[in-house]
Each structure stands twice: as structure tokens, then as C-alpha cells.
Image: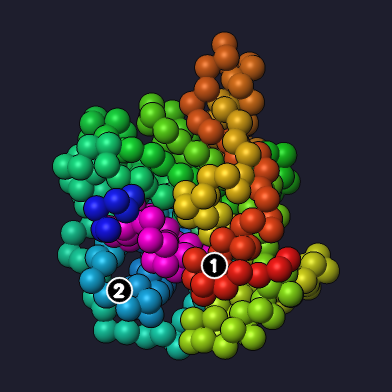
Amino acid sequence: MNKEREKIIIDCDPGTDDALAIILALHSDKIDLKAVCSVTGNGALDTTTKNGLNILALCGRKDIPLYRGSAVALDQKQPATVSAFGDDGLGGYADTILSDKKEEEQNAVDFLVEYINSHPKEITLFAIGPCTNVAKAIRKSPEFAKNIKKLVIMGGAKYTGNMSPVAEYNFWADPQAAHEVLQAGIEDVTMIGLDVTNKIALNCEMREILRLLDTDLSRFIYNITKEGLDDNWKARRKAVSPMHDVLTVAYFIDPSIVEIKPAFIDVVTDGIAKGQSIVDINGHWNNNICNAKYVATVDVNKFYNLFFKEIFNEGINC
Ligand code: BDR
Ligand code: CA
């Protein structure tokens, strides 16, 4: 059974939606999560590392190693961290899942290079925080990029942003890293941007279902998504909680929930549009040469059915 599962590594900055992506991956019988790597993002590196360890423990998977990654972006500066999920990264509920799980001694960049180069074309890598660790691995090893089987990125956005009118957080936090990763010649890259992940934000009905399910895990997800809901209500009168990163794993489990378009994608590394992703469908402005798949739309109902089915074995009517 285990042999048929797709081997993945998640590079992330947990973060509520990163935590949900890990939880979904751990509940899928299509996925074999080999390791988690941490990076600064939703919180300082100590916070994202600790949250990653505790999420694995919460899911009963202390056996999965976690490697601590980069504290600063490629420009050596600490990216401004968003407090969208509360100071502890998990909406004030991080301390409810404290565990004794320890991180590995090896750092995330060395681990990525060593593991992926020794398993060429076997590993799908998820980059759901700033791309710093992945860019450093590419700089470190000339073989690394071509040895990745598939890279799925949550980052960027077509025509929108959450850090500026045009920049999404993960690309904005380390735009040079995002640029280098996208231009590294990785054979199979999928970018899932904010314009689409905004559509799967957890609404009040879906969140209420979590309360009604009344398991330890459903209550935990209900709790950690409260802060995002409160923030969205205060900022824009929308009663939804962000779920961005979860779509990367959901797409991997069932690609039919999204529509994909080939594109040439790059990132603005500085200036007023810092972090903006340029999504050129079909490489129209680039001699029809594409370097990535752009997720253009998502079937929200299919997404929620998948989410509840995989994690709670519940079909839902939405
Ligand atoms: C991305 O930034 C982080 O806040 C989230 O975890 C997600 O990866 C959304 O812009
Ligand atoms: Ca993230």
C-alpha cells in the first residue's frame, strides 16, 4: 500500500493554513509525507519550527522528521512577518498542542539537497511559505532543480495581492528566491496564487460543520481558524478564514478540482511592484515558452468535499 503513495516534502511556515495543508497530507492515502522543512514567514523561525513539530505530533506522526530552515530571506533581511493568524501563528491555540517532538540536527537546505538528489525524480516538493530554502538548495546544488519530480507553490497572484495591490505574501517576503525558483528549469512547477486560494476561504457554514463533527481535530481546526475569520471581518467585512496553502495538497490529491493553464511566470524582485507575479498565459509575451502551470480556477464545492472526506471521512452537502 505504502509503495503506491506519492512521496512528498512540505517546506512551510506554519501558520494556520500551512498546518491545515500538513493535516490534509497526513490524512490522504495517496501521500507519503517524508519530511517537513520550516522557514520564517507567518512567524519567526522558532515559531514556525515549533508549530510544525507540534502539528506532526498532534496527528500522531512524531516519526516524520522536521528540519529547521532559513531565518532570513536571500537578502539577509528578516521578512516582515504577518500576524494574520495571531502571534503564535495558530490563532492563539499553538500552546494547546505542545509536544516533546524535536527537530533534526541537519538544516533544511542541506536536507533538501541531500534527500532530493539521492531520490531523483521521486519527490514532489511543496513550497507553501517564502521560497528561501528552495532557492538556497538550487544555489547549492546544480543537480537539485532537475531532480525534483514536481514543485507545487502557494505564492503569487494574478492581478491581486495581500501585501500590496499586486504582491502576495510568500513572493513578497523573498521575491529574489521566488524568481530564482521559477527560473531554475524545474520540469514540473505549479503555481497556486492568491487570486484562486482566496476562493476556498473557510466560510461560516463550513466552520460550523467542524464544530458539529466534534472530534479533537475538528475542534482544533475550528479554533485555529477563528482569528483569521475575525481579522477578515474587521478588515473587509467578510466572514471567512484563509485556507490558502491547503489548496496545494488538495490539488495534488485530485487535480480535477482546478483548471490549469500553461504560463510563463516570473516575479518582480524590487521597487514599487516588489513581489508581484507576472503570469503570462501560454507564454504569449515570451515566444510561447512556458515555465509553469498556473492554477486559474477552483471548484470550491469539490474542494470542500475533498477536504472533509479525506480528513473526517464525511461527505458534505454544500
Ligand atoms: C500565504 O502567506 C501566508 O500567510 C500563508 O500561510 C500563505 O502561505 C498567503 O499569502
Ligand atoms: Ca504558508
Residue 237 picture location, percent across and down: 83, 69
Q: Is residue 223 left or right of residue 164?
A: left
The foreground one among 5 and 148 is: 5
- Mark 2 or 1, nearer chain start: 2
Q: Residue at 30% of width from left, 45% of height from top?
A: 123
Q: Is residue 279 left or right of residue 142?
A: right
Q: Note whether residue 231 is visible.
A: no
- Quarter of the rendering occupied by the N terminus: bottom left
The answer to whether residue 304 is above or below residue 167 is: below
Q: Which residues are magenta?
A: 8-36
Query: How many numbered marks, from 0 up?
Result: 2
Q: Residue at 48% of width from left, 45% of height from top?
A: 153
Residue 126 picture location, percent across and down: 41, 50
Residue 98 picture location, percent across and down: 37, 85
The foreground one among 28 and 183 is: 28
Q: Residue at 38% of width from left, 55% of height from top?
A: 30
Density class for disc 1 (Cα within 10 Å; few <14, some 14-19, many ≥20) is some
Density class for disc 2 (Cα within 10 Å; few <14, some 14-19, many ≥20) is some
Q: Which mark is residue 309?
A: 1
Q: Is mark 1 within 8 Å of ligand 1?
A: no
Q: Residue at 57% of width from left, 69% of height from top?
A: 308
What is the C-alpha distance between the residues marked 2 and 1?
20 Å
**Residue 317 colored magenta?**
no
Would you name the residue on which mark 2 appears?
Answer: 61
Tell me the kind of residue under disc 2.
Arg
- Which mark lies nearer to you, 2 or 1? 1
- Quarter of the rendering occupied by the C terminus: bottom right
The image's colour scheme reads: rainbow
Tell me the kind of residue under disc 1.
Lys
Q: Is residue 203 left or right of residue 46?
A: right
> Does dot 2 land on a helix, a strand or a loop?
loop
The foreground one among 243 and 158 is: 243
